[in-house]
Image: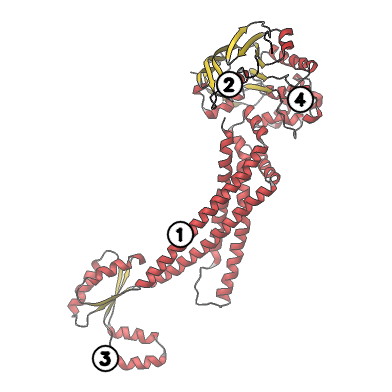
Amino acid sequence: MKSRTLLRHSKEGLKNIGRNGWMSFASVSAVTIMLMVVGIFLILIANINHIASDVEGDVEIRVHIDMTASEEDKEGLYEQIDAIDNVAAITYVDRDEGLDQFIEDVDEGSAELFESLRNENPLNDVFVVETKEPQLTEDVAGEIEQFANIDTVDYGEDIIEQLFAVTNMIRIVGAALVLGLMFTAMFLIANTIKLTIVARKNEIQIMKLVGATNGFIRWPFFVEGLVLGLLGAILPVAAVISGYYYLYDLLVTEAILSFVDIVPPNPLTFEIAAILIGIGALVGVWGSLMSVRKFLRV
Amino acid sequence: MRVTLKIVTIQGMRERKMHVFFEGSDRLIEMRDVTKTYGNGITAVNNINVFIDKGEFVYVVGPSGAGKSTFIKMTYLEERPTAGKIYMNGTDLDELKRKHIPLLRRNIGVVFQDFKLLPKLSVFENIAFALEVLEEPRHVIKKRVFEVLDLVRLKNKARFYPQELSGGEQQRVSIARAMINHPPILIADEPTGNLDPQTSWGIMDVLQEINARGTTVVMATHNKEIVNVSPKRVIAFEGGRVTRDEQRGRYAYEK
């Protein structure tokens, strides 16, 4: 296509947006609201995933070995655990080491108290097992429980399950909401463009009579839909970037909630901005092509 | 079957890909046992056979609802037949791909009773529109537009807008637009239907000149006077059938 023709199509498309001002405004608003929600959900999900992977990374299986187990038993157990498919690493922590770690973690007053226990250490020797994927923790723990010479097997069952439940729920609710809003926006754009088409019915008929291809006729509507979608993306993109930077500043730099670990805004917000622009363009173009199709049948 | 895409150069315009239907054979339109039944069950055209050759001037007459319009619409592919075969210069339209229909239409000029000009465009722009669609370069468009405006004697009205012109002048603009691609065939659906007798003759002059230059003209009309005073081949429709097809015919039915 020649650049002059492209210019013509763009001019036509933009003219149509102005011609149906209020409907265009409604479509843009719908896209804006939809993308706003998409943006918020993407930020939410990114952060939940971030926190989840932190927690999941911490999840380990602690295999407490029977006090009565001999060195040979321990070696046998080690080999058995090592033979399980999804085990990534096994660390042996003997009871003295375990107590050292424990004392390090508690405050000084209690530390002295526990120090006095050194001679009758209540702890077991422990194998700390890491799995290849956090989701596999439960299965691997189940297998290990079957082995001999084990006192108990611990892992963060509750934390993991709750975390997965919450993440999944947010993902499902988010997806449903986004899909619903996306179709609403698309429907509005399709209708807006239908108005332009009706207004230009004569023109289209004449174009067809003088032998314009469907592609040629479709272009201005394509431009119109694209521009509506992109206009709808402006506000959400600005809001996501500036809003998230502000929030991050507040939480991290100002140290209001310094223990909350959230994803830094760069590059996250820009990735989300790109996604929002992409969805806006897609919804706009899809809506426009949907409404033109019917009118192009000979 | 010849459904061919070729690079052709049309009278000074840049080379372009289009269907070459109108070379070789002299038979431009051939309808065999054609029937058109609309979705509402009405059969508008019932088993007609029509043949139109290169260079002919044909009147299509008949009362309203006789099938004239449907016949006309089938010639420029606004409607497709429900049964029978249509050949354009030997090419079976059943074998014409949908995406090639625009290419075929560039070979057919169409004129309507209500002109179908775009009110917001000047005379020049209205005609140029037909070439912009084909992405012709601007200097070619300008040259061609003035050529066809000369043909319809409206060279001095290029900057006017349709509502500033008389009905006859508007119709001449629409004829100019239809002729912009040098089509071998011009279809006119009641071109004088909205015009007074004096103006109608002006339109007839233009159409006859176009015909004299070699373009086949098919004209649906209710205008008894024109048919009788300027006798040519007449195809008469009644109740969806062709009831009469004669050279130098007369209008010959009472409204």
**Element under label 3?**
helix
Question: Chain for mark 4?
Answer: B
Question: Chain for mark 1?
Answer: A
> Badge 3 is on which residue?
A120
**x then y, percent, for residue B4:** 52, 22
Q: Disc 2, disc 3: CB below 8 Å?
A: no
| Residue drawn at (25%, 70%) of the image | A144
Q: Is residue A281 visible?
A: no
Q: Disc 2, disc 1: CB below 8 Å?
A: no
Disc marking residue A172: 1
- Dot 1, crowdedness within 10 Å: few (<14), some or many (≥20)? few
- Dot 2, crowdedness within 10 Å: few (<14), some or many (≥20)? some
**Amino acid residing under circle 4:** Gln
Closer mark to the observer between disc 3 and disc 1: 1
Labels 4, 1: one chain: no
Q: CA distance from mark 2 to mark 1?
A: 53 Å
Q: Please say if B49 is above or below B113.
A: above
Q: Is residue A127 visible?
A: yes
Q: In the rendered view, does A54 fall on the left or right side of B53? A: left
Whichever of labels 4 and 2 marks the residue nearer the N terminus, that label is: 2
Labels 3, 1: one chain: yes
**Amino acid residing under circle 1:** Ile
Disc marking residue B170: 4
Q: CA distance from mark 4 to mark 2?
A: 25 Å
Labels 4, 3: one chain: no
**x then y, percent, for residue B33:** 51, 14
